[in-house]
């Protein structure tokens, strides 16, 4: 969710007032914490405890990034070792609270000014910030395009028992899809923080975002770098110690197979199926034995056992079809 561009100017104006500045601004490392109260029980104090914890967990994430595709988590969410340097830089900036390069309105394109990242707590009683209460409905946090500001909403503070991702929240994998395929792994303070500051440091706002884990894995290597949820899901998976992941290549193979079957090209579909079976035999997908109510797609009903070398012929497996001279099927 994105905030009004006028927020930055509003906050700067308010913080320039001597009576407000000292009381409403503290720091945790390079992060500025604004309008989060004061005292040992304040939100500011809680953030000063939380941010070092997030930093420690991000060190684990950065160690995993260095493994590249040798890490199943990295392979799932970022696909290729070519992405290591960029992904590492984003997590390094989030961990360090590096200055955010903010574009200057009216200045030449590409001209930016560095600002410390700013965390703002929504407070319905504070002038200039109270209107954000309406924009925070239903979300834990929100980032503001082209600024250094992330707002923590009221829901963020209801997650006191869900500060970090848990191993019990790791999804299972069946038929090369996550189950459940939802957001629970990032529905915690760590996930919300990483997600919003991934927006800030990637500079990606206002585009359609992919949230569900299987769909996030299905993104291309380039698309994954422009989807902040990929950064949050990946980091949460590493922190939670998840061990089972969807194989992104097989997701793409299954899409291609479906297309071949839809077009009726049995020869091409047979060749691709045998390729997938051989790859599965060489690198088995770790799946849970849980029996699901939903039947698997056609491709995944085929048992590779005993077939990895001999292969299969889809033209013989699909009832009521035969091949014409062009390799197409017809009833």
Image (cartoon, helix red, strand yellow):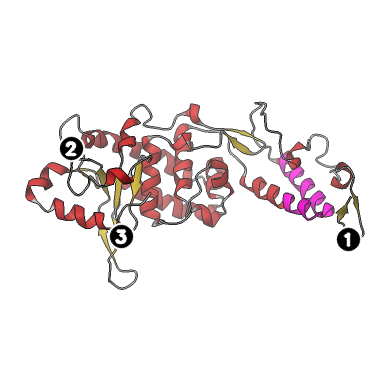
Q: Read off the magenta span.
A: 257-280
Mark 1 and mark 3 lie on one chain; the one further toward the N terminus is 3
Q: Is residue 42 visible?
A: yes
Marking on residue 37: 2
Pointer 1 local density, CA inside 10 Å: few below 14, some 14–19, many at least 20:
few
Q: CA distance from mark 1 to mark 3?
A: 57 Å
Q: Which residue is mark 1?
A: 326
Q: Secondary structure at mark 2?
A: loop
Marks 3/2: CA–CA distance:
27 Å
Quick check: can you spot residue 63?
no
In percent of the image, x 37 and y 47: which residue is there? 196
Residue 293 lies in what quarter of the image? top right
Magenta-colored stretch includes residue 277: yes
Above or below: residue 257 compared with residue 155:
below
| Residue 233 pos. (x, y %) | 48, 41
Report which quarter residue 141 is drawn in. Answer: top left
Q: Earlier in the sequence, mark 3 or mark 2?
A: 2
Mark with earlier residue (2, 1)? 2
| Circle 2 Cα neighbour tier, 10 Å, few/some/many (<14 / 14–19 / ≥20) | some
| Outermost residue to the left | 19
Q: Is residue 181 magenta?
A: no
Residue carrying label 3: 101
Please tell me whether mark 3 sits on a helix, a strand or a loop.
Answer: strand
Q: Position of residue 65 (x, y in %)?
A: 47, 45
Number of numbered labels in the structure image: 3
**As drawn, is 290 to the left or to the right of 125?**
right
């Amino acid at each position: 969710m994105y905030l009004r561009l006028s927020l930055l100017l509003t906050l700067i104006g308010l913080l320039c007032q001597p009576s407000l500045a000292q009381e409403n601004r503290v720091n945790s490392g390079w992060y500025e914490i604004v309008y989060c109260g004061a005292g040992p029980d304040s939100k500011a104090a809680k953030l000063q405890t939380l941010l070092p914890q997030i930093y420690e967990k991000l060190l684990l994430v950065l160690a995993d990034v260095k493994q590249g595709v040798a890490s199943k988590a990295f392979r799932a969410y970022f696909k290729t070792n070519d992405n290591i340097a960029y992904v590492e830089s984003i997590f390094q900036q989030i961990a360090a609270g590096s200055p955010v390069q903010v574009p200057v309105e009216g200045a030449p394109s590409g001209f930016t000014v560095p600002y410390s990242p700013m965390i703002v707590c929504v407070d319905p009683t504070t002038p200039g910030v109270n209107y954000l209460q309406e924009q925070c409905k239903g979300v834990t946090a929100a980032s503001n395009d082209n600024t250094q500001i992330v707002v923590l909403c009221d829901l963020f503070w209801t997650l006191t028992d869900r500060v970090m991702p848990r191993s019990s929240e790791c999804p299972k994998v069946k038929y090369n899809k996550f189950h459940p395929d939802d957001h629970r792994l990032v529905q915690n303070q760590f996930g919300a923080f990483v997600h919003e500051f991934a927006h800030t440091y990637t500079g990606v706002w206002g585009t359609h975002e992919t949230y569900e884990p299987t769909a996030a894995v299905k993104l291309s290597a380039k698309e994954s770098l422009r989807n902040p949820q990929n950064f949050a899901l990946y980091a949460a998976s590493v922190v939670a110690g998840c061990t089972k992941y969807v194989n992104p290549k097989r997701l793409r193979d299954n899409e291609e197979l479906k297309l071949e079957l839809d077009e009726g090209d049995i020869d091409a579909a047979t060749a691709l199926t045998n390729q997938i079976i051989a790859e599965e035999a060489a690198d088995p997908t770790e799946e849970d034995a849980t029996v699901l109510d939903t039947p698997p797609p056609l491709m995944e009903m085929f048992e590779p056992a005993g077939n990895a070398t001999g292969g299969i012929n889809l033209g013989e497996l699909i009832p009521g079809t035969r091949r014409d001279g062009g390799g197409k099927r017809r009833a």
